[in-house]
Image: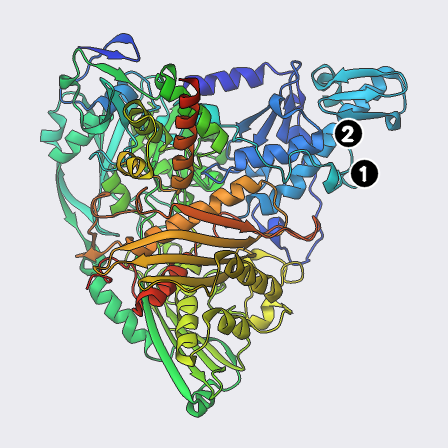
Amino acid sequence: MSAQMIQRRTFLAGLSGLVLVASVSRIAKAADAPKYGADGMQHGWRDDPLTFVAIGEDGIVTVVVHRSEMGQGIRTGLPMVIADELDADWSKVRVTQAPGDEEKFGNQDTDGSRSMRHHFDPMRRVGAAARTMLEAAAAASWNVPVSSVRAVNHEVIHEQSGRRLGYGALARAAAKLPVPARDSLRLKTPSQFRYIGKENIPLLDSGDIYHGRAQYGIDTRLDGMLYAVVARSPVFGGKVAHFDAAAAQAIPGVVKVIEIPGTPGPALFAPLNGVAILAEDTWIAMKARQALQIEWNDGPHGTYDSAAYRTELEQAARKPGKVLREAGDVDAAMAKAARKVEAEYYLPHIAHATMEPPSAAARIVDGQCEVWAPTQAPQATRENVAKRLGLPLEKVTVHVTLLGGGFGRKSKPDFATEAAFLSQQMGGRPVKVVWTRDDDLHHDYFHTVSVEHLQAGLDAQGKTTAWLHRSVAPTIVSIFAPDPQHEAAFETGMGLINVPFDVPNLRIENPAAVAHTRIGWFRSVSNVPHAFAVQSFVAELAAAAGRDHRDFLLDLIGPAPHIDPGALKDSWNHGESPQRYPVDTGRLRRVIETVTREAGWGRKLPKGQGLGLAAHYSFVSYVAAVVAVEVSKDGKLTIPRVDVAFDCGPQVYPDRIRSQLEGATIMGVSLATLGEITFKNGRAQQDNFNTYQVTRMAEAPHDIRVHLLPATDWSMPLGGVGEPGLPPIAPALCNAIFAATNKRIRRLPIGEQLAT
Amino acid sequence: MQLTINGAAMDVAAADDTPLLWVLRDRLGMTGTKFGCGMALCGACTVHVDGVATRACITPISVLAGKKIVTIEGVGATPQGKALQTAWTKVNVAQCGYCQSGQIMSAAALLAKTPKPSDTDIDAAMTGNICRCGTYPRIRAAIKQAAAGLEQKA
C-alpha cells in the first residue's frame, strides 16, 4: 500500500462525518417498464448522501467518486456537481475513490461516455440531500423552523438572528438525521450554479500529478511485494507446450517461475496462458523473462495473417450479406440511377497503447484478497478475481487507482486476475504484474478490423436515390461467445444502421466475419470505421455530383425532424430511451453549420491546401469537424488547424469537454495517419512505439478550436463526451487531403500513401 | 552504490546494469518517474542528469555515480520546474496525467537552456514525449505561459 493510500485511509477513518453512518440502499424502480440510461445498467445508480459524502469536523468535504478516472476529469466533475448542490466552498472539497462495489455505489463501468450522463442527476440529489441534512441539523440546534435557515458557502445561516454554523460543526449531528425523501429535495435552478458549467476549475488531482505523487496502478507498492512480468502465448488461444526456466531462475533476484494456465473457449477477461517470472524488481523480472525457453503450441489462430484476412473481408463485402435494415427498393433505384458510385474502405486493427501499460498488484491476507488496479470495470474485476481464486465476492476488494489512459483497454481486467492468481500461488504474498510495451501491443484486445463497402445511385439532379452499405468486421461478441459471425446491435447502432439520411431506397448489410484475435472496445468503437466510411463516401458523392460537400451533406440529412431510432431499426440507441434521446437531425445540421462557419468553409486556398468536413452522431451527442491540411509536393502532410463543433446538451465541466475534444482530435489524427497492428503467423508484428507509432507533438495540429453549442436549457438530457469527438476526425482529414490533392484515401492508416 | 537524487545522497542496492527508472520506482519508492516503453521512445521516464533531460529507462545506474539527478519529485525546487507546475495547473493540461511527469521534466530542461522557446524549439524538445490523451496544444500553451512568467520575474 502506498503512503498516499495510507494517508487517505487514516484521514477517512478519523472523520466523524456522514460516511461513517451506515447507508441504506433505497432504490425504487418501476417494475417491468423498459429500462434505459443508468436504470438499464447493471446495479443502476445510487444517490444516498451517506454513501458519497463525508464531512469532517474540520469542514473538509470528501466526495467519493465511483467512476474511474482515466483522463476525462470525472474525479473533479462529479465533486463539482455535489459541491454545487451542497453549496460547499470548493477549496474545502477533496476527492476519494470508491472501491469496486456496485451494490453500494451503483454501476461503475466507466465506458460508453456515460459517467456524467448517467450520474449528473443522482449526484445533484446527493449534494442537495446532504445540504438539507445540514440545514435541518442547524435548525434543530437553534430550535428554529428549518424554513428559516439556509446553507450558503459552507455554513448554515439563520438570518433573523444572524447566527451561523459551519458545515464541520454540523456534520456529526447532520449524519444522524434521516436522509430526506428524494421528491422532497430542493435542487438549485441553473442560475444558482456556482461550479456546474463554470470555467477555471483546475483538476483536483493537479497537484499530485504535477509533483509525481499521483498513484496509478503501476505505482502500487506493498510490503514484501514481488514484481512479475509474464511471457504470454504470442498467438491468441495458444498454449505452453514446454518450458525450461533453469537459466531464468539462475539470475540473482529471481524468486519464482509460475505458469499461468489459460482458459479454453472465448477470451472473456481471463488471463492468457503464460509463464510468469517473479523477482525482486521489475528489471530483474524482465531480464529473466528473456532467459526463459518456451515452446508454444499456437493452436488454430497460428495462421492468422492480416493481409490475407483483408482479402477475405473484401470478398465478403462484395457479396450480399445479412440484411439489417431495408427501405424502398435499392436494386431498382440503382438500376434507374443516372450515376452510380461505389467505394470500399479499410481500417486495420489498432492498439489502445495507454501510456500506463496494463498493471495491477494483489495480496491475500487471512483469505481476503485485495487488488489494486487501474480498471474501468471495478465490478467485473472483482467478479473475475473472485471466480479465478475460488473466493466469494465479499472476500475480494478492488482498490481503483488512477488510470494512465484507458480508451477501453482497461475495461478488460485480465491483468488484475494475473496479479491475484500469482499472489495466491505465492501464499498471498503481494505481487505486482507489469506489462511491458511489447506485451501491451502483442496482447491487446484490439480494435476491430473492417472493410466497409458502399454503393449509391444519384439521379440526374445529383440527388441520392439509393444507398447500400455493407460492413464486415469481427465482432466484440467473439470474446464472450464461441464464433459469432455478425456485428451486435451495440456495434451496428454505432453509425451503420442508424445513418439519418433522407434517402428513399436504402439497405444496410452485414456479411459474416470470424475473429482470430481478441477484439475489444476501443474509444468510440464501431463508430470509427462506420463514420470513416460514411463520411468519406458522402464527400465522394458530392464530388461525383459536382456539388459543395457541406451543401450536399445537409441535403442528404434533409429537414430537421426528431427521428425515432426504432425507425432506423436501431434497437440499442446507446442504451438510451428513444423518446428522451431521439436522433435530432436539427442538432446534427447545427453542428455542421457552426463548424463550417467558424472554419471559414468555402474560402479560397492555395494549391496543396484544403479543408475537409465530417459529421457524426454517437453516444447521443452531435459533432462535426473541419480539418485544414497542407500537403507538400513530396507528400508531407501538415494539419495547421482543426475546428470542432459539439453539441452534448448541457455542459457540466466545459473545460474538460474541450480537452476531450482536443484529445479525440489528436487521437483521430493518430489513427488516421499512423495506427496499424498487423498479424503474421498469428502474431502481432508491432513491438513498441518505433513500429507502432502514435502522433507526437510536432505532427499534432497546433491549433484546435472547439466550438461548444450551448444547450437550450438544463432540462435537456446530457450527451456523452469522452468518445464522440473521435469518429469524424479521420474522414474529415481524408476529405481535406482530397480537397488539397484530388487523392482519395480509402485505406487507413494514410502512412506513405501521399508520397509520390 | 550511492546516487545523488534531488539533492540527497541515497544508497542503492541493485545490479549495476539496472536502469535508473527501476531503481527509482522499485528500490527507492519514487514512482513519479513513469515507465512507458523501456526503449527511450516515449519520454515518460524523463529525469535530469546534470541538468540534461535523460531517459531513465535506458540509463544504467553504473554511469550515474557523482552525477546530480533531479526527478519530478524534486524539480519544483528549480525556478523552471515551479513555473511549469504552476502553468500546467492553470492551463489544466493533464488528462490522465501519466505522461505529464516526463513532459514537465523535458520542458524544464528546455526552459533552462532556452528561456524563450519558439514553436520549433518546443517541437524539438518535446517530440520525444508521447501523450496518448492528446494534451500537446495545452503543453505548448503552458510552456509559453511558464516562460512568460519566468521572464517577468527575471
Q: Secondary structure at mark 2?
A: helix
Is A725 on the left-hand or right-hand side of A155?
Answer: left
Q: Name the kind of residue labelled 2 in the image.
A: Thr
Is A516 on the left-hand or right-hand side of A146?
Answer: left
Q: Is residue B90 above or below residue A501?
A: above
Q: Position of residue A715 (x, y in %)?
A: 71, 50
Q: Which mark is residue A184?
A: 1
Q: Nearer the viewer, residue A328 or A557?
A: A557
Q: Position of residue A137 (x, y in %)?
A: 79, 21
Instruction: Give me the C-alpha separation between circle 1 and circle 2.
Output: 10 Å
Q: Which mark is residue A358?
A: none
Quarter of the image for the C terminus of chain A: give it.
Answer: bottom left
Residue A265 visible somewhere in the drawing: no
Q: Secondary structure at mark 1?
A: helix
Q: Nearer the viewer, residue A544 or A22?
A: A544
Query: Mark 2 — on which chain does it sit?
Result: A
